């Protein structure tokens, strides 16, 4: 593992442990009250969901362009993180919506496109797991569709009728509400980097195991 | 002709009876206007949903899922590392396990 990994993992753990206290000290939002505090985990999860989709898509393009399996391993690791952070987003969002919108789910542009993106990531992992030899190139094409959906998810709230807050909410947050949010964003970003590196490491070691089996086959 | 007059009378009777029935329905009451200030604990009961269970569920879900995922990746890394060490050792010994 690189030198930065263990300090980064420790800092991430400390930040993650401190985040509930930072969130608890944040003031209640005037309209939504206590339930608005779900926002501090929901939105960073959603951002990491989109970042993971971009990393997976860009790595897949690089893999298709160069044929270098290092990019493929990054894409696979990021694909798993899309499903992880997407799951967190798609579960915490409806829990917040139940109180603030009165329903767990509405089929508006953002929720629907997020669900579609999450299902594309699930399809990507299923294809990688059960697709057999050569499926990595087909899966890379699928990852491109997943990445193409990211801008649509982000801007959908500004262009379509939706009860989701628009993208202007975050820049206009006062410090007392903005500080816990950016604290959690940094925590989740660090968590994303640590998990991505850890997951890539698993794939790297697996590739070494496969290479050793091939070497043993050639020897025998 | 008499039959036609009789039918017209019946239709008129039914229409007028229906109109009277509709007109006699109670008018929808306007909401009572609040006069003056009212303490919040004297408000009429409305549908309310406690936020705490939703909040706790959301945070617990995030913590548990992340914990399980980290454990899962650590276990996978440990398994593949053990296999790698075993293969390295067998290559050094010059044989196939």
Image (cartoon, coloured by chain):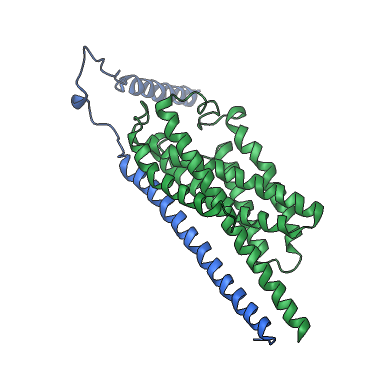
Residue B17 on image: x %, y %: 36, 23
Which residue is drawn at the image coordinates 22% and 12% (left, top)?
A: B35
- The residue drawn where x is 45% and y is 37% is A183
Relative image position of residue B30 (x, y in whole percent):
30, 18
- Compared to A97, does A12 lie above or below? below
For this rendering, which residue is in front, A115 or A142? Answer: A142
Q: Residue at x 45, y 42 (%)?
A: A41
Examine the rendering and report whether any part of residue A215 can be seen.
Answer: yes
Number of disc labels = 0
Dividing the image into 4 quarters, which one contains the C terminus of chain A? bottom right
Note whether B23 is above or below A164 in the view shown.
above
B71 to the left or right of A75: left
Q: The chain drawn green is chain what? A: A
* Residue farthest to the top, as pictured: B36
Which quadrant, please, contains the N terminus of chain A?
bottom right
Q: Position of residue A45 (x, y in %)?
A: 51, 44
The answer, for residue A83, to whether it is visible in the render is no
| Left or right, A4 with reference to A212 | left
Taking the spot 81% from the left edge, 51% from the top edge, the residue there is A65
Colour seen for chain B: blue
The front one of B70 and A88 is B70
Q: Looking at the picture, tell me which residue is in the foreground, A38 or B36.
A: A38
Q: Position of residue A131 (x, y in %)?
A: 70, 66
Q: Is residue B65 left or right of residue B20?
A: right
């Amino acid at each position: 593992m690189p030198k930065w990994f263990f300090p980064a993992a420790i800092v991430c753990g400390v930040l993650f442990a401190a985040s509930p206290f930072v969130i608890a000290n944040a003031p209640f939002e005037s309209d939504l009250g206590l339930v608005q505090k779900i926002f501090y985990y929901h939105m960073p999860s959603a951002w990491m969901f989109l970042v993971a989709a971009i990393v997976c898509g860009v790595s897949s393009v690089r893999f298709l362009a160069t044929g270098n399996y290092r990019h493929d391993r990054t894409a696979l690791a990021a694909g798993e993180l899309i499903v992880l952070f997407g799951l967190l987003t798609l579960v915490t969002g409806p829990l917040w919506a139940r109180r603030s919108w009165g329903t767990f789910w509405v089929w508006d542009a953002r929720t629907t496109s997020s669900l579609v993106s999450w299902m594309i990531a699930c399809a990507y992992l299923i294809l990688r797991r059960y697709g057999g030899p050569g499926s990595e190139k087909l899966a890379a094409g699928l990852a491109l569709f997943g990445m193409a959906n990211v801008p649509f998810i982000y801007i959908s709230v500004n262009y379509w009728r939706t009860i989701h807050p628009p993208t202007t909410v975050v820049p206009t947050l006062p410090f007392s509400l903005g500080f816990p949010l950016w604290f959690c964003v940094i925590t989740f970003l660090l968590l994303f980097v640590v998990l991505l590196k850890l997951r890539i490491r698993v794939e790297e070691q697996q590739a070494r195991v496969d290479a050793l089996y091939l070497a043993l086959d050639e020897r025998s | 002709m008499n039959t036609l007059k009789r039918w017209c009378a019946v239709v008129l009777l039914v229409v007028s009876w229906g109109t009277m029935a509709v007109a006699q329905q109670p008018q929808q009451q306007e909401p009572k206007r609040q006069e003056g200030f009212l303490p919040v604990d004297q408000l009429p009961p409305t549908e309310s949903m406690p936020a705490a269970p939703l909040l706790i569920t959301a945070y617990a879900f995030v913590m548990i899922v992340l914990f399980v995922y980290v454990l899962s990746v650590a276990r996978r890394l440990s398994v593949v590392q053990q296999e790698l060490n075993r293969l390295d050792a067998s290559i050094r010994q010059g044989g196939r396990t």
